[in-house]
Amino acid sequence: MLHKYPKDLVDKIIELWQTTMPAKGRKADKAFELPAVEILEELVSTCYQVSHMKEESRGLLFRVMLCEPEAFNPKCFGPFRDLFTLRFSELRPYNEYEIMKLGPAVDFNNSIIGIRLDREEGLQIWGFIHSGSRWTHAIQGGSKQPTPLPPALGLNVTGPGRITVCRGLTILAQLTGGTIISPSANVFKSHWMSRRFAKVQMQLASLHADNPLYDREMWAQIDPAFVGTLYLEFFKHVISTVRRSGHGGTIISLPAGLGDMVFNDNPYISMKYRFAEGGARSQLKRLVLEIMQTMAIRCGKRHGPTYVAGWRDYVQLPRDEVAALDEQIFKFARFVARLTGIDGAVVTTEGPELIGFGGIIQGTFEMGGEVARALDPEGKRKKIEKIEGVGTRHRSLYYLCNRLHQALGIVVSQDAEVRAVTWNGDIVTCWDVIPIDFT
């Protein structure tokens, strides 16, 4: 395999910059157009070099954004009025030394190094952009509205040779481990994934309609897509928590009908710690139903019973109305993530129910085995790979999906790479999941 380097990442940025831009925003984004190729190469290459450096034995994590400081003038760009900038009295040159020295001065989650392009002087550092940490909700999962960022080119450096390219909050691509990953292959947005969890959405919609308190003349309707969006935010938070732990882990999702299988002897998974029925095993389902009830009541009062409430309404509800439920959901996500801290997989159903943890898969693929790496969300375009380059955690999950086609697994390696794995067509297929958090 040929490794990818900054020049390859620049080619990918140019390819994606226009194709991923919403048509209605192209005129408004003229102020944030890409610079000439040689300038773009300098911008990316400098970050790549600094990513391998250390400042007094400290590894460097930092963000840079190519935009003029005037972009944050609230009179011109109202949505960004919550951001503030600190401009240097004198511009600094953009080079490895300056970035290496400035990196430790800014907190990755809260601040960005501002870069501008001067026609004569080239790239220059003009100061800091303080974003606060709420922008991370767009990546780590959560219901809070993330702090908006201008649709400018941003580079987030999170480790040696690891650069994530963004337009504002939108991830375009990431260079990591000599490969380039793009959200264009985001399996969580695939049709087959939506179909897989459609039964869960229908079940929760039915339970919501059977609520004895349900008032058709007062309660608003709930968009069926709301449940899927909330589940996605939940699993984003689970995965990002596992990634930050540094030890990796595996989460297996089984169809609801197979949940009881792991309570008995079976040829697939030996479960060390099983949760008894009842209690918090169905905690997420209970919380989602409570949130649906709260939304239906609040939105019904404001908009009437014909109104269809969705994710945007949930995010915009006053925090005091849903804060407790919201916190419980993401507290539960962190709890599930920490169960991966011991050997073995966490096993859930699509219900979702938390079945248990410490699940040992009975068998593993031999080293000569093959899997397909999907190149699009639906897995129609694939690349066959030998499995010599992965560890036991990956090979065991591949083996399970080869024998139990209904299984869906998420595996996080110790170096924080994430893959979704299931049976697709006639072969075990995996999707590279672009990192969901940057920390």
Image: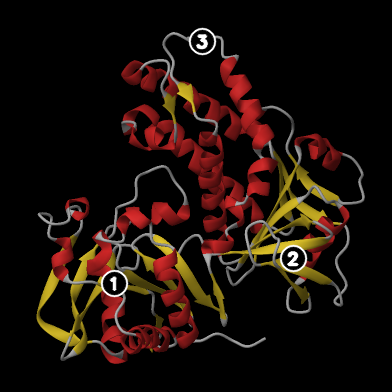
Which sits earlier in the primary sequence, circle 2 or circle 1? 1
| 61 and 422: which is toward the camera | 422
Tell me the number on the disc at residue 247.
Answer: none
Q: Residue at x 88, y 62 (%)?
A: 363
Q: How much space separates mark 2 and mark 3, taking CA atoms?
A: 46 Å
Instruction: Give the quadrant of the C terminus.
Output: bottom left
Q: Position of residue 434 (x, y in %)?
A: 54, 64
CB under 8 Å between discs 2 and 3 = no
Q: Is residue 163 visible?
A: no
Q: Earlier in the sequence, mark 3 or mark 1?
A: 1
Q: Is 28 displayed left or right of 310 in the figure?
A: left
Q: Which residue does the numbered mark 1 point to in the structure image?
A: 33
Earlier residue among tags 2 and 3:
3
Q: Which mark is residue 213?
A: 3
User: What amino acid is labelled 1 in the image?
Assistant: Glu
Q: Quick check: marks 3 and 1 in contact, CB under 8 Å?
A: no
Q: CA distance from mark 3 to mark 1?
A: 53 Å
Q: Disc 2 on helix, strand or loop?
A: helix
Q: For mark 2, what is the residue?
A: 393
Q: CA distance from mark 2 to mark 1?
A: 43 Å
Whether residue 50 is visible to the viewer of this picture, yes or no, is yes
Residue type of the residue flagged with mark 3: Leu
Would you call the spot at circle 3 few (<14 residues within 10 Å), some (14-19), or many (20 or more)? few
Q: In the orientation shown, which residue stands out farthest toward the left?
A: 89
Q: 337 or 74, which is in the foreground?
A: 74
Position of 276 relative to 184 (above/below): above
